[in-house]
Image (cartoon, coloured by chain):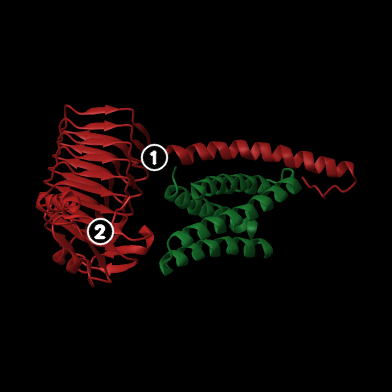
Chain colours: A red, B green
Amino acid sequence: MKVFPPTFNQILPSIFVVLFCLVANPTFAIEVHVPSEALSIQRAVDMANEGDTIVIDDGIYLENIVITKSLTLHAKNDLEKTILTAKDNKKSILTFLGTTGGVVSGLHFKGTRRSGVHIKKSKDILITGNKFTDSYNGIFLDHSEKIIVEDNLSTKNFNGINLEYTKSSKIIGNSAINNKEKGIILLFSDLNTVKNNIANENYWNGITLWSSLGNVVENNEAYNNTYGIVLTSSSGNTIRGNKTMRRLYFIWPVALIYFSILFYLIERKVFLFYFRSLKGSKMAPNETR
Amino acid sequence: MIATFFASLGFVIATTSFIGGFRMIRRTDHAIEASMHKFNGFLTIFLYLAIASISLLEEFTYLILFLWCTGFGVHLLKLVFVKKGLAVRYGGYMGGVFLIIWLIIIFNNLP
C-alpha cells in the first residue's frame, strides 16, 4: 500500500481539525517558571494570562503577591523547600482579590502579621496541600464564596483557618493544630461545610462558629483545646460525628498527686522486698530507726 | 505527647521523692527511704534533662535555655546540700521548690 506523499484531500480533514481547535480555544494555558523565566512570583503573575500556571522552584521568596486573575500556583518540588514569606509583614503573603478561579498548591507560607493566603471578594478558588506557619491567620477567606480549602496544614499561627462573611465554601481534611488562639473560625459565614479536619491543641477553641448560619460541621477532631467546638449566636447548623475532649487543666496535676501517693506505696513495697532479699543473702544495709 | 508523658512521670516521681524525703526525716526505715529518695531524685533529674532537651530542640532561645539551666541549678543545689549534710535543714524548702518547678512543667505540658 502506498502511503506517502499524502494528497491534499487526505490532509484536508486534519487541517479542519487544527483550525477548529484554534478557533474553539484561541489561547493556550502556559507555564511560567519562577525564577528561571520570571525572577519573582509577582513578576510571573503580571506576565501570566488567565488560566496560566506558575511553577515555583525551590527557594525562599520574600514577597507580597497580589493576584487578580485566575491562575494556578504550585511548587515544582517539595513543600518544605518552597517557602513564601512576607516582604512587608503588615501585608498578607498572597492575596486573591476579586478573582474567579485559581489554585494554590504545595507551598509553604511563613511569617506575616496578616495572613498566609488572603482570599478577598473571590470565588471558585482551590487551596490544597499547603503549609501555613508563623502568621496571624494561616488562611483567611474574606467576603468570598465557593472556596475549597483542602488538605492543608496550618500551625503555629494566631488563627489556623479564618472565614469571615464567606459562604458556600468547603473546609475539608485540613489540620489546624497548635495555633496560639483558635483552629478554625467561621465568623458571619453561612452555608459552609467543615468536614474531616483536625483542630487539636489550639490555645482556645478548636472550631468556632460565631453568628454563622446553616453550616455543616461534620467528622472533625478537636482534642486538647481549651474548648472543642464553640457556637455563639449561630443557628441552623448541623454538628455531627465530631470528636472532642477538653484539655485536662487542673484535674491532671491533682490526679497525678493521688497517683504519686499510690506510686510511693508500691515503690516502698518493692524496695522493702528488695532489701529483705538482700538481708537473706547477708548483704543487708545498715537500717536504723 | 512524649514531653507530656515525661512531664507527668517526672511530676509523679518528684512528688514521690518529696513524700519519701519527709518520711526520711522522721527516720522510719531510714535505709529504705534513703535509697528510694536517692533513686527517685536521680530519676527526676534524668526526666528533667529529657524534657529540657525536647523543649530546646523544638524551640531554642537563650531565655528558654537560661530558664532550664536555672531549674537544673536548683536540682544541683539540692545535691550540694545533701553532700554538705544540710539536707535536713534545707531539704523541705528545696522539695517545695522542686514541686513548684514540676508544677510549671506539668502546666506547660498538659494533656
In the structure shown, which secondary structural element does the residue marked by tag 2 occupy? Answer: loop
Question: In the rendered view, does A181 fall on the left or right side of A269?
Answer: left
Q: Nearer the viewer, residue A277 or A6?
A: A6
- Point out residue A75 in the picture as x, y percentages from the top left corner: 31, 59
Three-letter amino acid code at the position of disc 1: Arg
Instruction: Identify the residue at horizontal 49%, vertical 62% (top origin).
Output: B68
Q: Image quadrant of residue A51? A: bottom left
The one nearer the camera, A272 or A105, is: A105
Q: Residues within 10 Å of mark 2 (few under 14, many from 20)?
A: few
- Using the image as rendered, state which of residue A88 and residue B85 is in the foreground: A88
Query: Disc 1 or 2, which lies upstream in sequence?
Result: 2
- Element on which disc 1 rests: loop
Across and down, in percent, residue A158 comes to 27, 53
The reply to whether residue B36 is in sight is yes
Can residue B85 be seen here? The reply is: no
Q: Measuring from the top left, give residue B72's x and y in whole percent.
A: 54, 62
Q: Is residue A85 left or right of residue B74?
A: left
- Outermost residue, front side: A1
Which amino acid, mark 2? Pro
- The label shown at residue B107 is none
Q: According to the image, label 1 marks what residue?
A: A247
The residue to which callout 2 is attached is: A5
Residue A118 or A156: which is nearer the viewer? A118
